[in-house]
Amino acid sequence: MDFIQNFPFFSILLSLGSGVLTSIMNKKAARIWNTFILTAITVMSAVLFVYMLDVGEPYTFMMGHFPAPWGNEIRAGVLEAGMALFFCIVMMLSLKGGQEHIDAEIEETKVNLYYIMINLLLSSLLALIYTNDLFTAYVFVEINTISACGLIMIRQSGRTIEAATRYMIMSCLGSGLLLMGLCVLYDITGHLLMSNIKESVAYVYAQGTYKVPLVASIGMICVGLAIKSALYPFHTWLPDAYGYSTVSSAAILSSLVSKGYIFLLIKIFFRVVGFDVIVDSKIVNILFVFGLFGMIMGSVNAILENDIRRMIAFSSVAQIGYIYMGLGLGTTIGIVASIFHVLSHASTKSLLFIAGVGLTDASGGSKKFVDLTGSGYRNPMAGVAFAIGACSMVGIPMFSGFISKLLFAQAAVANNVGKQLPTLICLAVSTVLNAIYFMKTVIRIYTPSGRNAKKTQAGEAALMSMKEHPLYHVTLLFMIILNMILGCCSQPIVDWITSGLAMFG
Amino acid sequence: MSRLLSEEEYRKTKAFKVKRWYRGEKDPYIGQVELKPQKQFQEDINAQKQRIHDEAILRRNIYDIEHNKKLQLFSKFYKVISVVFVAALIGILLYVVSYLPPVGNAANPDNNEVAEKYIEDAMKDTGAVNIVTGMILDYRAFDTLGESNVLFIATCTVLILLRVDSKSKKKEEEESDRLYEPKNDIILQKVAFFLVPMIIIFGIYVILNGHLSPGGGFSGGAIIGSGLILYVNAFGFKKIERFFTQKTYKWICFAALSFYCLAKTYSFYCGAHHLETGIPLGTPGDILSSGLILPLNICVGMVVACTMYAFYAMFRKGGF
């Protein structure tokens, strides 16, 4: 076995162990250590990614002395390694972009608790990506949920505690459904390991003996994970959770936490139940319909919003709708489009949150649209970054959002008429709605404010210069570059996703 | 009276005191135990008015039912829809259950080679007589590592929510808490005096025998934790802070979990590369057997006990 094949195991255990280690550290040490392990895991994932592209064969790694159906196992392929790399980069950028706010908004003695949450969240995301065992996935879903809750409420105000309570209730419902689904699945297959379940499911499905429990368990798993990743009718926890928590938390929650669950769902589609069975069970059609609703309703809600953070949060609902619509198309090309949109949305949404906070800082901390007038001149870098993020969300060429919309449209055209027409219509309508609220904001931040308007409600509007906040500006620059890479060099990435999906099956 | 001791020495013995109490010459409670009638809680009439007024305003602002038509409609529909939804869910699940394989049937899909190997080879493979412990701490130790981290992160989240760190708030909080703390409840103290050591010793027994008999780190830790909670209820926070403070908690958790992580990293690494760990399994049935399971059980037990106590202390007064 090559030494590089240890890297997934190292990265999971390193982040898990650092969570424990951080509990005895002070604020500064915790931050430095967190940066260190994030860098280390990013490098390891990058090396693994290059290695996997070279080898082109997935491999399994035994966690312990006992082979797979008895012991635990993790599995790595191109898609897993690439996802891990991408998640680490986005997490690093979100943390660095919001670092000043972490320092300002969180009590001095609790900052190390924040980094405990971040480290354990990272470990759970990595474990969700790499695991080959459904029960391990469930255990790490729990860690993911609790740490996300901590991230929301660490900035202690009434709204965040209310948001965290909502999140906890909805998430517990989701976890409960997921657990029940897994139990039923275990009862009819007798396995927890993904590859073994897939064989048993194919057998059970061909036999037709346990068809009702099988369909019910698939339904419970899908709905459970859909609740946790805020698909449209289950999105009620989302706006407050993203709107009032500290900005790094919001960026990480929207771009990573919900995406981890979506990745798990795709993994369950391909590696546990088998894609043919999923498509045959018609569950995808339900996800498709909810996805379409989400695309429209999320945007409508965002238009009605008068608070920039909540507007970006509602835009997340629409984007999650896109992803589920892609899953619902029921073709491999649709899934490829969805995975690309996971990447595109993760990079764009974190960029928007970080840029948005720069704009609100330059307006005396007010998040109201009226006060944001002209903030693009007061904080030029954040203004440019926000404009780029908005263009990407609307789907202007050169930026990542355009490519994912293109892929969705291609996937829709390849489908039958029943799904083709609604998809194309909803894509068009949703794009127009996106343009309405994002362009409204961009125009607002570049409207010169008169001398009188400079005194905003929340206080004197401050100029944000490059010299005072170097870290923030560098982070934004990196985020823009990441977005442009996704938008301009999309073909290798799409090829990578396609080959990774082929390795899944 | 005693024949062996002089009158003066005899007066000092317990027997004399018991006899005096028996004859009714002296009641040991009078003059020794302070019996104070509880003061009735009294509030200034203006403060009371203010409080009621504030509550009413708050209530009106939040639940403005008369003017909020939407909320009125919502609260009506909410009840109906929630009942319908739950009933539908119960119906679907019952329907699913009726299709599941019958319990205890030998031909069920879950009676396969996985369960078979656990039952037949667990003692040989892991050295643990208790198969369940063998499964959770050796076969599937990665899941259990995640699970103990779930406990750890749950305490951290409660710390975020309830720990009172700012100085002024802390003082205020402690003062108000001390007022309500029961003092010198003699019955509770006497019972706890006997029970707490027994509970803790039983917890330690359950942990140490986790690989031999039913039990293990999770259950034993819960027992020790409840012993600690009983202790703090009987004797107050001042007494327990002599040996268990926030610092103790922090270091115990850190030591236990980092030992767990390191030990398992070593064992996973060796396992994946098919190397020998060099940890002897011992004779099944001995207390010192089954390799890493015993130390890991102790770690899990410590984490669970600390978590239980920390939750209690956090809810009671926002700190240790």
Image: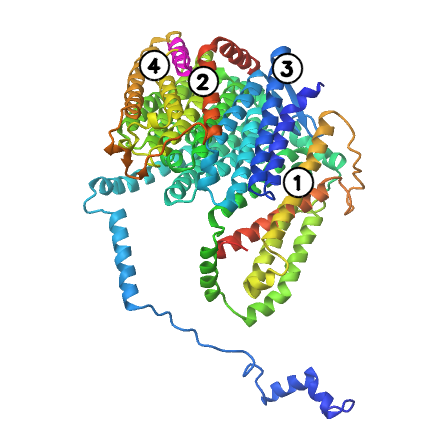
Q: Are marks 2 and 1 on the same chain?
A: no
Gap in Å between the C-alphas at discs 4 and 2? 25 Å
Camera-nearest residue between B235 and A49: A49
Q: Are marks 4 and 3 on the same chain?
A: yes
Q: Which residue is mark 4?
A: A423
Residue situated furthest left in the rendering: B67
Counting residues from the start of the chain, the first of labels 3 and 2 encountered is 3
Q: Are marks 3 and 2 in contact (CB under 8 Å)?
A: no
Q: Secondary structure at mark 3?
A: helix
Q: Which residue is mark 2?
A: A483
For the residues carrying marks 3 and 2, which lies nearer the camera in this image? 2
Left or right, A387 with reference to A266: left
Gap in Å between the C-alphas at discs 3 and 1? 31 Å
- Which label is found at residue A51? 3
* Label 4 crowd (10 A; few <14 / some 14-19 / many >=20): many
Q: Chain of mark 2?
A: A
Question: What are the residue bounds of the magenta stretch?
Answer: A398-412
For the residues carrying marks 4 and 3, which lies nearer the camera in this image? 3
How far from the left and from the top, in percent, is residue A188?
A: 54, 27
Q: Which residue is mark 1?
A: B258
